[in-house]
Image (cartoon, rainbow, N blue to C red):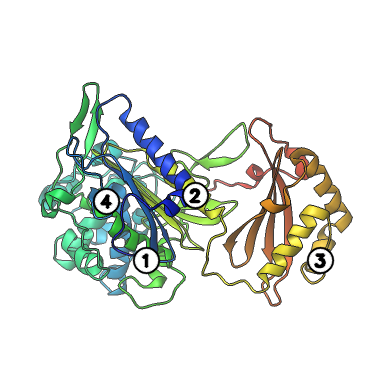
Amino acid sequence: MPKSHFETAPDSETRRKYWNIDDSFRHTANEIAGNTTGTPALAWAVVSQGAMVHVCSTGETALGNGHRPDVNTVFRIASLSKSFAAATTLLLERHGLVDLEAPVANYLPGLVDAGPSGRLPTLNDVLSMSGGFPSDDAWADRQETMTSEAFDRLLAGGTVRTTRPRQTFQYSNLGYAIIGRIIETVTGQPYPEVVGKLLFGPLGLQSTTFDHRTVPHDRFAHGYRLTEHGWKLQKPTAPGAFSAIGGVLSSLSDMGKWVSTLAASTLTDDGPLPSTLRRRMQQPITPVPFTVDPATGLPSSRDFPWGISSYGLGIFIEQDPDFGLISHHVGGYPGYGAHMCWHQSSGTGVIALGGSTYAPVSAPAGLALKSLLKRPLDTSLEIHNLDRIVAGVRSFMLHGEVTAGVFSPCVALDRSWQERRDELAYLKTHVGPLAPDGCQVSIIDNSRLKVRFHGPGGVLAAGVLLTPVHPRRVQVLALEDHPARGRPPDPLSRGRPTRAAHVSNNKP
C-alpha cells in the first residue's frame, strides 16, 4: 500500500525527476484559471508498485484562504466512483446476492423498460456500458440527491434505451444509478453504507466518504465553476439515489491505495477485493467508438483523450501500441474533475484531482503516465535473459548484427536477415544516425518489449515479442519509424500497412 503522508512541495531530487509532469499540471491549472483571480485546488500523484512516490499540488482549497491542497485534502472524484460501484457488485455476486448475467429488472420489479423489444439488459451489460441506455451526463450530474423512493417512481415511469444490449458503447449514468439501487435492494442497506463496509473500511480508505458533511472543513477542497464574472462556488450535494455514478469524495492518499489495489490485479491474495475480481474489472468488454487522425493515420477513442479502448466493469481499458493495457477512468462533475490511470503490467499509475467544473486533468494525467513508462522503471515482471535479449536487439538496430541465441529461427524464416537489414537501412534514411547512448526500453508485459533509438529525423523503434517457452528468445522483431515533429509520416517506409489498418470497431 502507498505511504500515507507526503509533502506537496517535493524535495529538489524529486522535483528534478518529475519536473515535466509537474510543469504539465501547473500549465493545466493556469489554463483553467485564465485571467481570473485565484486558482482552485489541483493535486496530482504518482504511484508505483504499491507506493506513492510523488505528490504535488497548486491552487487553494478555498479561494483566498492561502491553503494549498495536500495528500489528505478531500475532493469529489466524480465518475471515478463507478469503479467502487462495479467492485461492490462483484463482491455481492461472490456472496451469492446477485447474478451479473441476470436482467436488472429481476431485482427491480417496478422498473418499466420502454424498449427496444428483445432481451433486457443484464447487470453485466449495464456495468460495461452496453445496456442500451443513452448517454446522459448533463442530466444525471444534477440528480444525486434524489431519494430512493423518487428514483423508484422514475423507473416505474419508463426507462428509454436507444439500442438493444451489447450493440454499442453508450456512457450511461442512469445504468449505474440502477446498479446502486439494486445493491440497496439485495442488501437492505443504503448504498453508501454497503460500499463503506465492503471497501472503504477494509482497504483503510479513512478519508473516503459519500457525505461532504463528514469531511473536516480544513481538509475539504471546495469546487468552483468559472463564469463570465469569475469563479462561482458550487454547493456540495448530499448522498442520494445517484451516488453510485459519481458521489465518492476522496483524497490522493486514499486514491493511491485504491489505484494500487486495482493495479495489483496480477497478484494472488485474499484481500477485501480478490485479484480475480480486480482482473475481471479490467478485462475489455465493450469497444469504445474511435476516430482516426488524418495527419498520422493513428486511431484514438472518440470523446476520450487516449487511444483505442474498451469499457470493462467500471473502468476504461486502453490498448496502447507501445505499452500494452492501460486502465483509466475520467471524472467530471459540477465543481470537480478527476482522473486515474495505471499501466496494468508494471503497476505505475497517475492520479489527478481538481476543484473546478470538469477540470481537464485527463490529458496531462495520461501523458504523465506514458512519459513515466518511457523511463527505465523498476518492475515486478521477471523476464529470463532480458539483458541479453535487449543487447541483441540493440546490436541489430545499431549495426545490423545478429547475436547467436537471441533470435528464434522463425525470425529469419518469416523474413530473411538481408531483407531486415535492407528495411533497417531504409528506415535510417528517414531517422538519421542513431544515438547509441539513447536507447529506451519499455516492458509492456513479460513477453513484449519496445526498444527505441533517437535520431535527428525521429525515432526508430522495434516491437519485440518473445517465445512462450524457456530459454526466452525473440520470435517477432517489428521495426517502425516515428517521424520528428514537422516531418510527415511515410506509411510505405515499413513495407506494410500502417497500424490504423489493423483496427476494428466491431461491436459485440
Q: Which mark is residue 70?
A: 4
Q: Nearer the viewer, residue 413 or 259?
A: 259
What type is the residue that disc 3 sits on?
Answer: Thr
Q: Quadrant of residue 225?
A: top left
Q: CA distance from mark 3 to mark 2?
A: 37 Å
Q: CA distance from mark 3 to mark 4?
A: 51 Å
What type is the residue that disc 4 sits on?
Answer: Asp
Of labels 3 and 2, the one closer to you: 3
For label 4, count other residues whose C-alpha is less than 10 Å away and answer few (under 14), some (14-19) or many (20+): many
Residue 81 x/y as whole percent: 28, 53
Total of numbered circles in the picture?
4
Q: Which residue appears at 35% of the width and 36% of the height?
A: 29
Verify CB contact (< 8 Å) between mark 3 and mark 4. no
* Circle nearer the N terminus (4, 2): 4
* Circle nearer the N terminus (3, 1): 1
Q: Is residue 359 visible?
A: yes
Verify CB contact (< 8 Å) between mark 4 and mark 2. no
Verify CB contact (< 8 Å) between mark 3 and mark 2. no
For label 1, count other residues whose C-alpha is less than 10 Å away and answer few (under 14), some (14-19) or many (20+): many
295 relative to 359 in the view: left or right:
right
Q: Which residue is mark 2?
A: 309
SS state under label 3: loop
* Circle nearer the N terminus (3, 4): 4
Q: Which residue is mark 3?
A: 403
SS state under label 2: strand
Q: Which residue appears at 39% of the width and 41% of the height?
A: 25
What type is the residue that disc 2 sits on?
Answer: Ser
* Circle nearer the N terminus (3, 2): 2
Q: Which residue is mark 1?
A: 261
Q: Which mark is residue 274?
A: none
